[in-house]
Image: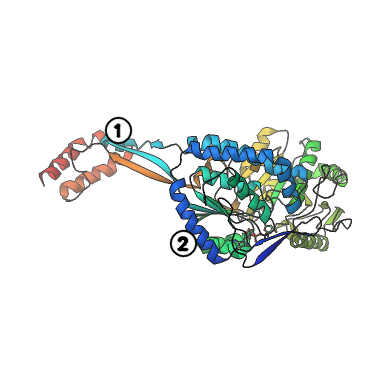
């Protein structure tokens, strides 16, 4: 048993195929006691793993890529069956991007985490040098959601391993088999025992992992759970990265390529049935093109093919769960009640037994409506109009969330100007949603969307502790600021404040006579 942990079953959780509502399988609901045992094993495994070279770690990651490529269709099918998403998206939005991330971090982690000399300014003239080395943290706990159950946890596993950490992954209770698959992949490449463990279970298992005092938690999920985790992690001073979703705005100016913007809006709102943290959940369109643009959106939405995820031609498939569909029903109902118009969709798709909700376009929405403020996480696209650039920016920023946003215009300088005024972790110009797929770029949000970053250099730096090594190469005299103090010392320190602290060598030269006097004094003591 190396990568996958199998515990005696204390309690089970059942995973369902959301397209059919049928049972997909059962796994252990790992107890707090067994989580504790996993953490102990993880700590032991870390002691050896932290000593491995980047080259050795990369070998495991690159071999794991090969396993995924060998089992490409089987894994894509597993992702579709357990999470509900179309097979096309299992490949394009889960497997392909994470394979790219794997090769990127396998090849570049050493470069990103290379020891770094620091320019310490005038302190260097005193014969000192400083450098930073990056040390692995220990055990990283990964607690992902169910919406990208392969790419999000696997990406974080790979980055944690490349940084030299041991990992415990607690997959979502809605998609445990996909989590176990990640463990199995690393087991196949003989990753040393317990360096990666997968503990299945629900929120209680997750809570036990947070409460175990491990070194880092990487969490993806709801704001409420994120806050609970941050609170509980604080008891151990465990640091946390929180990725808590969004209510992402898309701004379409009249001078945009409207055909492209409409296609982008539809993909941004309806891919993965709208269950992406960076889904388009608010569309702001310039007033005098709003009617034509909305018509275009509705026409295109009506042409989408909704069917089960296992078919290659399915555009929009099942949602992940009944629980999620209820939130969408509730939001659409509140749009209706508050005076918005449902132009297409607006109900469950009764042609299917499972959790299917029709892609829904809504007009006459306003920022005050509940469905414009809370995360829907479903296939809905509410549209609001604006008159000026300032109004568009104000409406886009009028949200508790700030994960991603997009601006659509052919005028790129306007696009960039508006992008920089939007409070979101990522803002795209004439692009939407997909940058989680670029492993090189940071991912994370402002405001209630969470804190910390995954992916890119900043994501990797979350998984290490920078250690400062400072060396004094000049061993002839004591430091001028050491004891004993005297009037001569105080005069020197005045000089430090006035001259040395200016950062200027020329200014500091004025301090030399006083400094020599002070050193002489110290050496005579
Ligand atoms: O998430 P939860 P849910 C949003 C979206 C959705 C809502 C609820 O709006 O409707 O969240 O989704 C584990 N200690 N997002 O209920 O509960 C849990 O087992 C430790 C946005 O599924 O946050 C699972 O593995 N762990 C989002 C994970 O937390 C705990 C993606 C997420 O569950 C725990 C998904 C606890 N006390 C939902 N309680 C995004 N950022 O993309 C639960 N968990």
Question: Residue at label 2?
Answer: 236
Secondary structure beneath disc 1?
helix
Spot occupied by residue 15 in the image (x, y as percentages of width and height): 72, 59
From the viewer's side, name the closer residue of 265 and 180.
180
Q: Residue furthest bottom?
A: 10
The residue at 75%/40% (across/down) is: 253
The residue at 55%/66% (across/down) is: 32
Spot occupied by residue 149 in the image (x, y as percentages of width and height): 67, 51
Number of residue marks: 2
Residue 270 is tagged as none
Q: Residue furthest right?
A: 351
From the viewer's side, name the closer residue of 168 and 216.
168
Left/right of residue 109 with respect to residue 345 in the rendered view: left
The residue at 39%/45% (across/down) is: 467
Q: Residue furthest front?
A: 1
Spot occupied by residue 437 in the image (x, y as percentages of width and height): 65, 41
From the viewer's side, name the closer residue of 394 and 52.
52
The residue at 78%/46% (across/down) is: 86
Q: Is residue 386 visible?
A: no
Question: Residue at label 1?
Answer: 505
Residue 24's place in the image compared with 306, above or below, is below
Instruction: Indicate the colouring scheme.
Output: rainbow
Spot occupied by residue 37 in the image (x, y as percentages of width and height): 51, 61
Q: Earlier in the sequence, mark 2 or mark 1?
A: 2
């Amino acid at each position: 048993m190396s990568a996958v942990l199998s515990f005696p079953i204390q309690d089970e959780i059942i995973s369902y195929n959301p397209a059919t509502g049928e049972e997909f399988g059962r796994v252990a609901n790992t107890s707090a006691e067994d989580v504790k045992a996993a953490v102990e094993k993880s700590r032991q495994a870390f002691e050896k793993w932290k000593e491995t070279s980047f080259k050795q770690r990369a070998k495991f990651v690159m071999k794991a890529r090969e396993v995924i490529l060998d089992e490409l269709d089987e894994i894509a099918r597993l992702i579709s069956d357990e999470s509900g998403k179309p097979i096309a998206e299992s490949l394009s939005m889960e497997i392909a991007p994470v394979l790219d991330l794997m090769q990127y971090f396998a090849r570049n982690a050493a470069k990103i985490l290379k020891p770094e000399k620091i320019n310490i300014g005038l302190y260097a003239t005193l014969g000192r040098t400083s450098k930073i080395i990056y040390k692995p943290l220990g055990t990283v706990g990964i607690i992902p959601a169910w919406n990208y159950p392969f790419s999000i946890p696997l990406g974080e596993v790979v980055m944690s391993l490349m940084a030299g950490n041991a990992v415990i992954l607690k997959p979502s209770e809605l998609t445990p088999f996909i989590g176990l698959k990640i463990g199995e992949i690393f087991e196949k490449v003989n990753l040393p025992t317990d360096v990666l463990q997968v503990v299945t279970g629900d929120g209680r298992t997750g809570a036990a992992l947070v409460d175990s005092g491990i070194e880092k938690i990487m969490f993806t999920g709801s704001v409420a759970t994120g806050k609970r985790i941050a609170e509980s992690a604080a008891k151990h001073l465990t640091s946390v990265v929180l990725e808590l979703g969004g209510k992402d705005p898309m701004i379409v100016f009249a001078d945009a390529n409207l055909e492209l913007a409409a296609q982008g809006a539809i993909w941004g709102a309806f891919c993965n049935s709208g269950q992406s943290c960076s889904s388009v959940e608010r569309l702001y369109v310039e007033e005098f093109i709003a009617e034509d643009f909305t018509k275009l959106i509705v026409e295109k939405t009506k042409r989408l093919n909704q069917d089960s995820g296992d078919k290659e031609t399915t555009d929009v498939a099942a949602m992940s769960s009944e629980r999620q569909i209820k939130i969408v029903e509730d939001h659409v109902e509140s749009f209706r009640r508050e005076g918005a118009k449902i132009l297409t969709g607006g109900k469950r798709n009764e042609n299917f037994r499972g959790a299917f909700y029709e892609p829904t376009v809504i007009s006459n929405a306003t920022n005050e409506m509940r469905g414009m403020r809370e995360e829907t996480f479903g296939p809905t696209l509410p549209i609001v109009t604006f008159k000026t650039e300032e109004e568009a920016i104000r409406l886009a920023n009028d949200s508790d969330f700030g994960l991603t946003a997009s601006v659509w215009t052919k005028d790129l300088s306007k696009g960039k100007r508006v992008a920089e005024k939007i409070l979101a972790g990522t803002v795209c110009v004439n692009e939407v949603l997909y940058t989680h797929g670029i492993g090189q770029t940071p991912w994370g949000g402002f405001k209630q969307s969470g804190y910390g970053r995954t992916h890119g250099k900043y994501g990797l730096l979350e998984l290490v502790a920078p250690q400062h090594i400072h060396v004094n190469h000049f061993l002839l005299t004591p430091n001028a600021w050491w004891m004993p103090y005297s009037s001569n010392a105080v005069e020197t320190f005045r000089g430090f404040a006035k001259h040395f602290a200016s950062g200027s060598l020329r200014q500091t030269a004025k301090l030399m006579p006083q400094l020599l006097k002070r050193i002489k004094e110290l050496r005579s003591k």
